[in-house]
Image: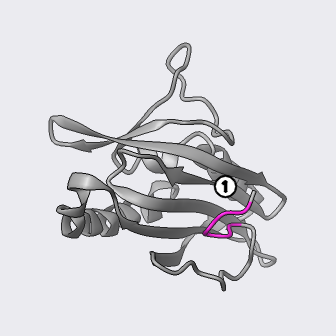
Amino acid sequence: MDTLTQPLSPRWVDRPAGYRDFESAFFIGHGRDTFDRCAEELLHWEVKIRSGFDIGLAQTGHDIPRVEAGQEPTIFVRLGPFRLPEPARVITVFESETRRGFTYGTKPGHPITGEESFILIRTPDDRVFLVLRSVSRAGMGIWRLGEPFVRLAQIIYRRRYARALRS
């Protein structure tokens, strides 16, 4: 499925108009073992969980299910004693020898309208990077008033994502 952030493309050239776009790569480590471990963590929502989010999915037991295309989690951001819901839909999941990750889009009720991709890459020289790509604009209704705070929160959480998979 085509996404606005083009997670399978090595270079993100066609960025959509009308959105703020973001792309950055963060060094995670070296080697196949690091890549495989981080991929499994990423595909079990750990990048979000370790960054201060709870993942609400219909599930049995206590384990968070693996990310799957079509999943519709409500991602909850923890703000002190409060949990702010962020409805989302997983657009695509991709797994190859050198690139693994997923993309989700926001649903009505999310503070922003947009899409976010988490792309784990293993380079030919065996370095492992987490690449974040996102497009966003103010959400609907009351969220338009809080846009400056939402933008600040994006900056904070991106920094947390950058550290979430490092050992």
Q: Is residue 13 magenta?
A: no
User: Front-most of 35 and 2?
Assistant: 2
User: Front-most of 12 and 37?
Assistant: 12
As helix, strand or loop, the secondary structure at mark 1 comes to strand
Vertical side of 160 occupied by 89: above or below = above
Bounds of the magenta segment? 2-7
Crowd band around label 1 with a 10 angstrom C-alpha radius: few (<14), some (14–19), many (20+): many
**What residue sits 50% from the left and 36% below the top?**
73
Q: Residue at label 1? A: 101
| Residue at the top extreme, as displayed | 61
Q: Position of residue 82 (x, y in %)?
A: 18, 36
Chosen colour scheme: one colour
Vertical side of 102 occupied by 75: above or below = above
Left or right? Give the position of 54 relative to 115: left
Q: Position of residue 134 (x, y in %)?
A: 50, 68
**What residue sits 47% from the left and 61% below the top?**
114
Q: Quadrant of residue 3?
A: bottom right
**What residue sits 42% from the left and 59% below the top?**
113
Q: Position of residue 111 (x, y in %)?
A: 32, 54
Vertical side of 14 occupied by 137: above or below = above
| Residue at the bottom extreme, as displayed | 13
Looking at the figure, which quarter contains the N terminus? bottom right
Amino acid at dot 1? Gly
Which secondary structure dominates the residues rendered in magenta? loop
User: Front-most of 90 and 18?
Assistant: 18
User: Front-most of 58 and 24?
Assistant: 58
Vertical side of 59 occupied by 143: above or below = below
**What residue sits 83% from the left and 57% below the top?**
96
